[in-house]
Amino acid sequence: MARDFGLRDQLRRAATSVMANIAEGFGRGGNREFIQFLGHARGSCTEVKSHLYVAFDAGMVSQPDFDRLYRLASEAEALISGLMKYLQVSALRGRKFKETSNLEP
């Protein structure tokens, strides 16, 4: 029983980490940092998928639920990868690199 709670907690923390890393990276204000944190978020998607396999193998998740959740984690991973690729070639560099000439006296 305690193992079920531990795995559920790990899965929740990994899923929450995806969102938190995207938010933190965006908040840094520059593409380089954002891409770095998107990489962490993508890694957390992989961690979610790994925990789903453990839960499925332990009989804690049904096949339909596993398939649906695994697909969603894979879609999130692909979207994050696409955003990373876009940011690597984008001319936009983030708000901390915007011109500040209009703020100077």
Image (tube, rainbow, N blue to C red):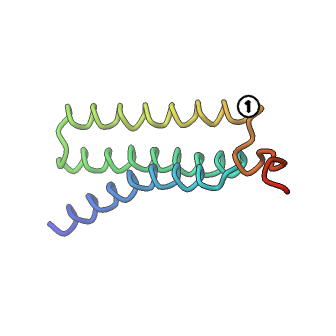
Residue type for callout 1: Ser
| Left or right: where 15 falls relative to 34 | left
Residue under numbered circle 1: 90
Q: Total marks drawn?
A: 1
Badge 1 marks a residue whose secondary structure is loop
In this rendering, position of residue 2 left or right of residue 82:
left
Point out the residue furthest to the front here: 105
Q: Which residue lies furthest to the left in this view?
A: 1
* Residue ranking furthest to the bottom: 2
Find residue 64 and report its image quarter: top left
Picture coordinates of residue 79 (x, y %)? 51, 32
Q: Looking at the figure, which quarter contains the C terminus?
A: bottom right
Neighbour tally class for label 1: few under 14, some 14-19, many 20 plus, Cα within 10 Å: few
Q: Where is residue 71 in the image (x, y as percent from the top left)?
A: 35, 31
Which residue is drawn at the image coordinates 18% and 49% (left, top)? 60
Q: Which of 87 and 69 is in front in this view?
A: 87
From this view, report whether residue 46 is shown above or below residue 9.
above
**Residue 54 picture location, percent across and down:** 30, 50
Residue drawn at (59%, 54%), measured in percent from left and top? 27
The quarter of the displayed image where residue 67 is located: top left
Q: Nearer the viewer, residue 67 or 93?
A: 93
Q: Nearer the viewer, residue 102 or 89?
A: 102
The residue drawn where x is 80% and y is 47% is 102
**Quadrant, the N terminus:** bottom left
Q: Which residue is drawn at 59% across and 52% down?
A: 25
Residue 13: percent from left, percent from top: 37, 59
The residue closer to the viewer here, 7 or 96, is 96
